[in-house]
Amino acid sequence: MISATFAPEADHITELRRQLSRFVAEKMPREKRREWDVNHTWPRDLFREIADMGLIGLTIPEDYGGLGQDLMAATAVLEELQQGGPFVTGPFIHAAFYGGMNISENGSAAQKAAMLPKIAAGEMLLCYGLSEPDVGGDLASVGTTAVRREGRIVINGAKRWCTGADWSDYIYCLARSGEKEERHRNLSFLLIPTDAPGVSMRPIEHSNLRYTASMDVHFDDVELDDSAIVGGPEKWNQGWGMLAGRALDVEKIEITAVAFGTARAAVEEAWQYAQEREQFGRPIAQHQAIAHKLITARTKLQAARHMLYHGAWLADQGRPCAIETSMAKLFVADTGVEIALICQQVMGAYALSDAYDMDRHVRDLLGMPIVGGSSDMQKNNLAKMMRL
Ligand SMILES: Cc1cc2nc3c(=O)[nH]c(=O)nc-3n(C[C@H](O)[C@H](O)[C@H](O)COP(=O)(O)OP(=O)(O)OC[C@H]3O[C@@H](n4cnc5c(N)ncnc54)[C@H](O)[C@@H]3O)c2cc1C
């Protein structure tokens, strides 16, 4: 009906969309989506199918078993999978982005050789250990410590919201590896096996992105060797730099694609509902108040699409895009909340029932300005980048 992108889309991406749209329609019906949401779980068999299609390889160089990085295609995959909710998108992100993208960008030669082929094959998953009980947006103040002692690294502390720690192989963990006063210059990223002695965890109940329970993780004298340092021993205390650059730009695109995909699913559901639901002798879409709401939501969605794919295109081309990807995250997350609330109004009582997906779309979209760098933090970062 309206054009999906501002330029003709590459044929292989159009074909991917076609395949994934059929995949979602056939294999992720509403009853299943509701079941996964209620049980905080994701379908291992469907993730296996996505891995077998080679799609995790869209963030991984060919030398390591990937398809070569294709960020426009990877973004489209997230958008299309998200039409079935976060239940396959979630684990796909743990593989392709937390794993594939970060290890491709920041891993040592040995880590790339050992991990990327397994990640590309869907046989290895990573989760993020950034947040802590006392640390949200202010990541430079993490309190989890990593101390080098007689050739070993000893880790102590706690991570909060470590989503997927209970089924991932490694925690991609930000730790303080020197004096607290140094702040940005004494941080390191570590790959902590989730089954290492001294790692314990318990689930946290939450209302959004319920493809899994999130986890509180504790490290009690967890001992690793130098091979656990992301990038190798020479990257000790260089962790802050890994939070910036291309991996971060792609990270912002990835969470923006989830927000956009959810907003698209919300608009589609409200759009269809308004044509089927009749009140006062006609479909509610024919009442001007509802038609205006739907047109407003669709227009906001189109603006969000342009922000997302422009950022993805810049990142894909290897062009500087820190500002555009921050703006995209900010705009799409905040606009997604507006879209959620509009679509919820259109569907009246049924937006609050479990007969439709709208309740989940609203829960997921309300969380988008918080997760993956809050809207306030994006504004702070943009003000700094634009020298205000
Ligand atoms: C479902 C879910 C899954 C998650 N998964 C993960 C995960 O896998 N790994 C992980 O590490 N984390 C994860 N998180 C945590 C998420 O990244 C944090 O919630 C996020 O970083 C924000 O931190 P906070 O909620 O503690 O907010 P805080 O940092 O405490 O901020 C609270 C509010 O104050 C505002 N604020 C704070 N500082 C400033 C400032 N300087 N200027 C202006 N405003 C400010 C914020 O924008 C926010 O609105 C997850 C969270 C959820 C809900």
Image: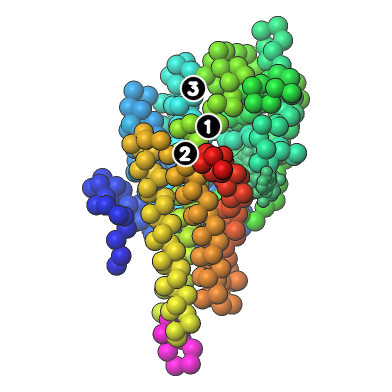
Q: In front of the other: label 3 or label 1?
A: 1
The foreground one among 141 and 145 is 141
**Residue furthest front in the image:** 388
Q: In front of the other: label 2 or label 3?
A: 2
Does 170 sit above or below residue 362? above
Does 19 sit above or below residue 100? below
* Residue annotated with mark 1: 244
Mark 3 and mark 1: Cα distance apart in space: 15 Å
Question: Where's the N terminus, which quadrant?
Answer: bottom left
Which span is picked out in magenta?
A: 278-286
| Left or right: 203, with 83 as reference point | right
Provide the secondary structure element on which disc 2 rests.
helix
* Residue annotated with mark 3: 107
Are the residues at dot 3 and dot 1 in contact (C-beta closer than 8 Å)? no
| Left or right: 279, with 147 as reference point | left
* Residue annotated with mark 2: 322
Q: Is residue 213 visible?
A: no
Residue 178: horizontal and vertical position, in percent? 70, 18
Are the residues at dot 2 and dot 1 in contact (C-beta closer than 8 Å)? yes
Residue 180: horizontal and vertical position, in percent? 74, 24
| Left or right: 80, with 381 as reference point | left
Provide the secondary structure element on which disc 3 rests.
loop
Mark 2 and mark 1: Cα distance apart in space: 9 Å
| Amino acid type shown at disc 2 | Ala
Mark 2 and mark 3: Cα distance apart in space: 21 Å
Name the residue: 65% across, 17% down: 224
Does 246 sit above or below residue 209? above
Residue 347: horizontal and vertical position, in percent? 52, 75
Q: Would you identify the image quadrant in which residue 132 lies?
A: top right
Name the residue: 41% across, 52% down: 307
| Amino acid type shown at disc 3 | Gly
